Protein backbone atom coordinates (compact mmCIF):
# COMPACT_ATOMS: atom_id res chain seq x y z
CA UNK A 1 0.00 0.00 0.00
CA UNK A 2 1.35 3.43 -0.96
CA UNK A 3 1.68 6.08 1.69
CA UNK A 4 0.64 9.61 0.86
CA UNK A 5 3.36 12.21 0.96
CA UNK A 6 2.88 15.34 3.01
CA UNK A 7 1.47 18.27 1.04
CA UNK A 8 3.72 21.16 0.08
CA UNK A 9 2.25 24.36 1.53
CA UNK A 10 3.36 27.90 0.68
CA UNK A 11 1.93 30.25 3.29
CA UNK A 12 1.30 33.90 2.39
CA UNK A 13 2.52 33.45 -1.20
CA UNK A 14 0.97 36.78 -2.16
CA UNK A 15 3.26 38.49 0.35
CA UNK A 16 6.40 37.03 -1.21
CA UNK A 17 7.60 40.44 -2.37
CA UNK A 18 8.40 41.33 1.24
CA UNK A 19 9.18 37.79 2.42
CA UNK A 20 11.77 36.72 -0.18
CA UNK A 21 14.29 35.81 2.52
CA UNK A 22 12.14 32.81 3.51
CA UNK A 23 13.17 30.97 0.33
CA UNK A 24 16.50 29.50 -0.73
CA UNK A 25 17.20 31.11 -4.11
CA UNK A 26 19.71 29.68 -6.58
CA UNK A 27 21.02 31.24 -9.81
CA UNK A 28 18.97 30.06 -12.81
CA UNK A 29 19.70 32.38 -15.74
CA UNK A 30 21.36 35.79 -15.84
CA UNK A 31 19.25 38.06 -13.59
CA UNK A 32 16.84 35.24 -12.66
CA UNK A 33 16.93 33.15 -9.49
CA UNK A 34 14.99 29.95 -8.79
CA UNK A 35 13.55 28.25 -5.72
CA UNK A 36 12.55 24.72 -6.77
CA UNK A 37 9.40 23.34 -5.17
CA UNK A 38 9.49 19.89 -6.80
CA UNK A 39 10.81 18.13 -9.91
CA UNK A 40 13.09 19.78 -12.40
CA UNK A 41 15.68 17.04 -12.55
CA UNK A 42 14.15 14.98 -15.37
CA UNK A 43 11.58 15.27 -18.15
CA UNK A 44 8.57 15.26 -15.81
CA UNK A 45 6.46 17.87 -14.08
CA UNK A 46 8.07 20.57 -11.96
CA UNK A 47 7.21 23.71 -10.03
CA UNK A 48 9.34 26.61 -8.86
CA UNK A 49 9.35 30.23 -7.83
CA UNK A 50 11.30 32.41 -10.25
CA UNK A 51 12.63 35.81 -9.17
CA UNK A 52 13.44 38.25 -12.00
CA UNK A 53 15.68 41.20 -11.16
CA UNK A 54 14.64 44.51 -12.78
CA UNK A 55 15.52 44.36 -16.47
CA UNK A 56 16.01 40.57 -16.51
CA UNK A 57 14.86 38.49 -19.48
CA UNK A 58 14.37 34.83 -20.28
CA UNK A 59 15.37 34.02 -23.87
CA UNK A 60 13.07 32.55 -26.49
CA UNK A 61 11.84 29.15 -25.39
CA UNK A 62 9.29 26.54 -26.49
CA UNK A 63 6.84 24.87 -24.13
CA UNK A 64 7.12 21.09 -24.45
CA UNK A 65 4.06 20.71 -22.19
CA UNK A 66 1.54 23.01 -20.54
CA UNK A 67 3.08 25.81 -18.46
CA UNK A 68 1.21 27.80 -15.81
CA UNK A 69 2.67 31.10 -14.60
CA UNK A 70 1.12 33.05 -11.71
CA UNK A 71 2.66 36.49 -11.27
CA UNK A 72 2.73 36.98 -7.50
CA UNK A 73 4.63 40.28 -7.32
CA UNK A 74 5.85 42.86 -9.82
CA UNK A 75 5.09 42.33 -13.51
CA UNK A 76 6.44 40.62 -16.59
CA UNK A 77 5.86 40.95 -20.32
CA UNK A 78 6.19 38.92 -23.49
CA UNK A 79 5.22 39.31 -27.16
CA UNK A 80 1.57 38.80 -26.23
CA UNK A 81 1.14 41.34 -23.42
CA UNK A 82 2.01 42.77 -20.02
CA UNK A 83 1.10 40.81 -16.87
CA UNK A 84 0.87 42.45 -13.46
CA UNK A 85 0.68 40.69 -10.08
CA UNK A 86 -2.37 38.44 -9.98
CA UNK A 87 -2.15 37.47 -13.66
CA UNK A 88 -2.27 33.79 -14.58
CA UNK A 89 -0.76 32.75 -17.92
CA UNK A 90 -1.33 29.27 -19.34
CA UNK A 91 0.89 28.44 -22.29
CA UNK A 92 -0.03 25.37 -24.37
CA UNK A 93 2.45 22.84 -25.72
CA UNK A 94 4.23 24.12 -28.83
CA UNK A 95 3.86 27.79 -27.91
CA UNK A 96 6.92 30.00 -27.50
CA UNK A 97 7.84 33.43 -26.17
CA UNK A 98 10.54 35.64 -24.63
CA UNK A 99 9.87 36.96 -21.13
CA UNK A 100 11.09 40.29 -19.76
CA UNK A 101 10.53 42.11 -16.49
CA UNK A 102 11.34 45.81 -16.53
CA UNK A 103 10.51 46.28 -12.83
CA UNK A 104 11.35 42.79 -11.60
CA UNK A 105 8.87 40.15 -10.48
CA UNK A 106 8.36 36.85 -8.72
CA UNK A 107 6.29 34.16 -10.40
CA UNK A 108 5.07 30.70 -9.52
CA UNK A 109 5.85 28.46 -12.49
CA UNK A 110 4.32 25.01 -12.91
CA UNK A 111 5.53 22.94 -15.85
CA UNK A 112 4.08 19.73 -17.23
CA UNK A 113 7.42 19.22 -18.99
CA UNK A 114 10.57 21.37 -19.06
CA UNK A 115 10.81 24.21 -21.56
CA UNK A 116 13.36 24.08 -24.38
CA UNK A 117 15.45 27.24 -24.77
CA UNK A 118 16.23 28.21 -28.37
Image (tube, rainbow, N blue to C red):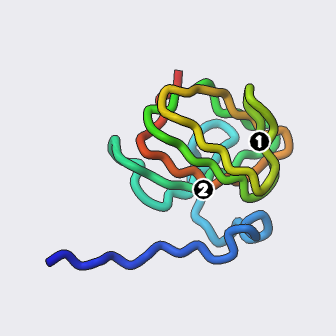
Residue 76 badge: 1
User: Relative to 103, is 24 on the left or the right?
Assistant: left
Asked if residue 62 is positioned above or below residue 13 in the image, the reply reads above
User: Relative to 83, is 88 on the left or the right?
Assistant: left
| Residue at (62, 48) in percent of width and height | 69
Which x, y percent locates residue 39?
40, 54
| Residue at (65, 33) in percent of width and height | 58
The residue singled out by tag 2 in the image is: 49
Label 2, secondary structure: give it. Answer: strand
Question: Going by the picture, which residue comes out furthest to the left?
Answer: 1
The answer to which image quadrant residue 59 occupies is: top right
Q: How crowded is mark 2: few (under 14 residues within 10 Å), some or many (20 or more)?
A: many
User: Relative to 77, is 27 on the left or the right?
Assistant: left
| Alpha carbon separation for disc pair 2 and 1 | 14 Å
Asked if residue 42 is positioned above or below residue 39 in the image, the reply reads above
Which x, y percent locates residue 101?
78, 39
For discs 2 and 1, the disc positioned in front in the rendered view: 1
Amino acid sequence: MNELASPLVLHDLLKIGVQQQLYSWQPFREGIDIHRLYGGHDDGPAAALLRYQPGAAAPLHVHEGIEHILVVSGAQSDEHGHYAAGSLLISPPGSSHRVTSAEGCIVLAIWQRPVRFL
